[in-house]
Image: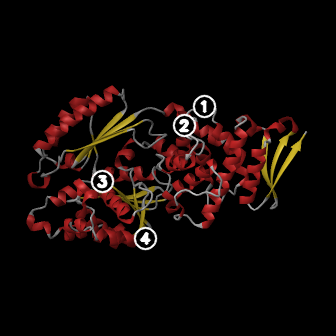
Amino acid sequence: MIIEKALKQKNLISKEAIIDLGSNSIRMLIYESILNSQIPIFNEKAVCGLGKNLDKTGKLDPKGSVFALSVLQRFKRILNNLKVTKYKIIGTAALREATDAKHFILKAQKIFNKKIEILSGNEEAQNSALGVIIGFQKVNGIVADLGGGSLDIARVEKNKILETISLPLGVLRLYNQPKSNKNKINKIISFFLNKVEWLRKNKIKNIYLCGGTWRTMFNAHIVKTNYPLPILHQYKLSGSEALKFSSRLSSVKSIKAEKLSNVTKSRTNYVPIASYILSTLIKICDPTNVYCSLSGVREGSLINKKYLSILQNNSLNRFVHFIALKKGDFAENYLKLYNFLKNIFPKDSNAFPTRLLLPACSLSNFDWGLGAYQRAELVFQEVINSPILKLSHIDRIKLGLVSFWRYCSTKYYPDLEFVKLLNNEEIFACRQIGAALRLASSISVISSIFFDKIKIYKDGNKNLVLKISNKYSQVISNQVQKRLKSLADEMNLKSKIVYSN
């Protein structure tokens, strides 16, 4: 089977790390296996301000440089302790432009005995786009990565990077403009963005935003609207919503008036600049949607062509297999469960896409050692917060509902604030998948080997049939019969058990 073959490329699994020397902060991320899980197991940032006065002096900030080197020494000790030997160090705008960057780079390279890769502006834009591509199902639109020293933009169609550009519009750079230029920041932003012809001439469906200041803005929107799922990755606003909200964050005074200064914290001074940039981008591009992406230049810098082809094809399935083995499913029972159930559900359903059935079979089966009471609620919360980039917020809620109904009857519901985000067709599809998994769990109570001995199928539009040999009739307990009927009811069918010789 194709799925099994694709999932068992275990020769490419190893810890990997990346250190990003940015203009405002430096960060180290360590991944247990970048091919199987693009969520880091270690993530530490230090605000060093290497590019704090770059536009005034043309040099790196002296205090920032000393601090950065001490942080890098700590990062090196962590890599040694965790025995991570596969890692990359990248530098961006400040190290591209500073006249004394070479001196700092030599000192940093001496700490690691490793070369630092200084990305050009176009390389930074390209790697940011690659990071977004591995974090979304399909990317169509503009990827915009806002850092301290630059704004790096890429145009992507169907996961293909077509254009890239780097602009001197970083939040630290603009914040440190001389006082005489402070009132001209909007004009500076508008000047550079309007010069990019392919932004104006192409129809842009989506904008994907990377970078800490934009993440802060999205987080502020989650808090302000009481959105029930506080996950930034793939958080989505319409173009008009994003424009309206960014205009409300156009000054530190307005941020405080919105009572969001506690949310923005250390980035409060930069948020107004980021809001100007986003507002201008939206006015130029007129996108339908604006997305937040947690994956960007760091993830993209770790992805080579070989990795990218693997991740584009089946990164969701690879994560499912990876987490199943970590949680002890060494017999790969979730694959048996998937093969048992897959034929009774439509392959082209928008309500519950086929690509979600495999993770549903795996994730819903992990009760994480929880007690019997409130298990459905707890598993629901675990699943919707699972560390998987490829899942949209709607995908997460669907998988969460399926997992909830795997542990309790469909007459119960979890927090209705989540359910309201789905339409009726999607809710009914989740109820069916959940009821199917609940039926399967009553079979696997005896033994999961019976998934190979029993067939379940639809007999036209009338019956849901469970076919089993007389030899294994002991499997058909009262609970199995009851749950088969419950699933059939959800599918508007009648339940039927057929025994064969």
Which percent across, then down, holds residue 348?
65, 59
Residue 122 visible in the displayed image: yes
**Compared to 187, does 475 lie above or below?**
above
Q: Earlier in the sequence, mark 2 or mark 4?
A: 4
Q: Amino acid at mark 2?
A: Gly
Q: Which residue is mark 2?
A: 369
Mark 4 to mark 3 CA distance (whole Å): 27 Å
Q: Which residue is mark 1?
A: 330
Q: Nearer the viewer, residue 78 or 348?
A: 78
Q: Earlier in the sequence, mark 2 or mark 3?
A: 3
Residue 149 visible in the displayed image: no
Mark 2 to mark 3 CA distance (whole Å): 35 Å
Q: Which residue is mark 3?
A: 212
Q: Amino acid at mark 4?
A: Lys
Tell me if label 2 and label 4 are in contact, CB under 8 Å: no
- Name which residue lies at 16% across and 42% down: 101
Tell me if label 1 and label 4 are in contact, CB under 8 Å: no
Mark 1 to mark 2 CA distance (whole Å): 17 Å
Q: Earlier in the sequence, mark 1 or mark 2?
A: 1
Label 2, residues with CA under 10 Å away: few <14, some 14-19, many ≥20 = few
Q: Which residue is mark 4?
A: 203
Which one is closest to the eye, mark 2 or mark 4? 2
Identify the image quadrant of residue 102.
top left
